[in-house]
Amino acid sequence: MSYLVFARKWRPQTFSEVAAQEHITVTLQNAIASGRAGHAYLFSGPRGVGKTTTARILAKGLNCEKGPTPDPCLVCPSCLQITAGTHLDVLEIDGASNRGIDEIRDLREKARYAAAGGGYKVYIIDEVHMLTKEAFNALLKTLEEPPEKVVFIFATTEPRKVPATILSRCQRFDFRRIPFRVMADYISTEAAGEGITVSRDALGLVCRASGGSMRDALSLMDQLVSFAGRDITSETVSKLLGLVESDLLAGIARAILTANPSTALDLLEEASLRGYSIEEFNEAFSLFVRNMMLAATGAEKGIVDLSEGEMDLVRSCVAGVPDIAVLNVLRIMAAASAQIREGADPRITIEGALLTASRLSSVFDLSHLPQVKVSPPAAAVPREEAASIEITTAVAPPAATPLPEGSQTEIPRAAQGPDDSKRVRENEDIKEIAGLFDLIPEPGGEGVRGEP
Ligand SMILES: [Zn+2]
């Protein structure tokens, strides 16, 4: 099925249809209404948020037969020609492919002559930052003495690359990323109108993947419809984008925090069976753990663009977990990422990191979590008695298996059990592994960095 439902339909024709840029569209409408349109505008902002669209609407507003008007009629020959891209006096120039001085000189020459239709000449230069230095200089001369009824609209994703001399002669408008909610509302309304079902989680993934670009979100929706038909689930989106599904990430996080390294590694294998690369997994998991940390510390405001379903998953992973435990997992994953960047084998590093993180969780008392595997001997002892064993063994370790010097005070509570010598050895192993990741946990709860 080939469908271009979304991208083609989303072509705002009036200022009020431009999503989420009211701070700009209202100002432009007022300028036209009061006859104070500028000679040069700089529209900056991320791709796909409405810069060129707004430029075309401005051109229509200036050249509409009913205008200049803040509400172009859209049906007069001038409006229709601008929509079709055939208007003789409204020229769109791609700054990336017309970046030289000759093109700009040519443009300057033509700008001297009055518009054929008696209205405004509008030059829309997209990706203006791509122009050469000489081209900018040529342009500057025109901007210094702008011809009557000529309007330049420069669009750029990188305003910092535009020379200050040019910037100072432009009215600058910074376009925003389209907020998640606005985008989600728009897409779900359009989808419903077309009889396409999009699950909330799928919608969340689409909006997040678009990075705030409406154009990207809509072309992604078109791809999804071609790929999966009229029923779009988060699984479909994940497959198309190579995103690792949240439930898988949550499963791994829970396995780690409940000291189930084998489950964590099984799920990593599952991710790879589903076609995700280790790099994709690492990126997604690190982000997931970051969100967990924010949730654990009550700083949920920092979590952006998660659907309610995903947010619930994140919260469920940290319920009852000390934030320091989550922080340590985050640090282990960050250390693993750094090692991979330095050339370590990604798969081995990530497996090692998951294992380390799982083992470290035993340092914290997480035994109350539902999925924890409590080792039988410890479980047989009531909690208060376990505490007394801790004191006893610390004072008098079995003579046959002397503890390493100074280790008594370092045995964390959760590692206590009848076979203390084994526990101590495990604890030392954990510290050794943790040392590899530049991370030594303190049983008291504070994580401290080890010596490099
Ligand atoms: Zn018109």
Image: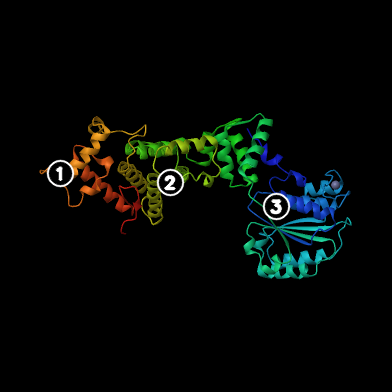
In the image, 298: left or right of 105?
left
Along the line of sight, which residue is nearer the eye, 279 or 99? 279
Which numbered disc covers residue 282? 2
Which numbered disc covers residue 51? 3
For the residue with label 2, is its CB less than 8 Å from the closest atom of ligand 1?
A: no
| Amino acid at dot 2 | Asn
Q: How is this picture coloured?
A: rainbow
Residues at marks 2 and 3, CA–CA distance in whole angstroms: 34 Å
Asked whether residue 421 is in view, the answer is no
Which numbered disc covers residue 128? none
| Amino acid at dot 3 | Lys
> Which element type, helix, strand or loop, lies under badge 1?
loop
Q: Residue at x 53, y 39 (%)?
A: 240
Q: Nearer the viewer, mark 3 or mark 1?
A: 1
Q: Which residue is mark 1?
A: 397
> Which element type, helix, strand or loop, lies under badge 2?
helix
| Amino acid at dot 1 | Pro
Assess disc 2: are there few (<14), some (14-19) or many (≥20) residues with their C-alpha within 10 Å of its C-alpha.
many
Classify the position of the C terminus by image quarter.
bottom left
Along the line of sight, which residue is nearer the eye, 30 or 74? 30
Q: Residue at x 58, y 40 (%)?
A: 206
Q: Earlier in the sequence, mark 1 or mark 2?
A: 2
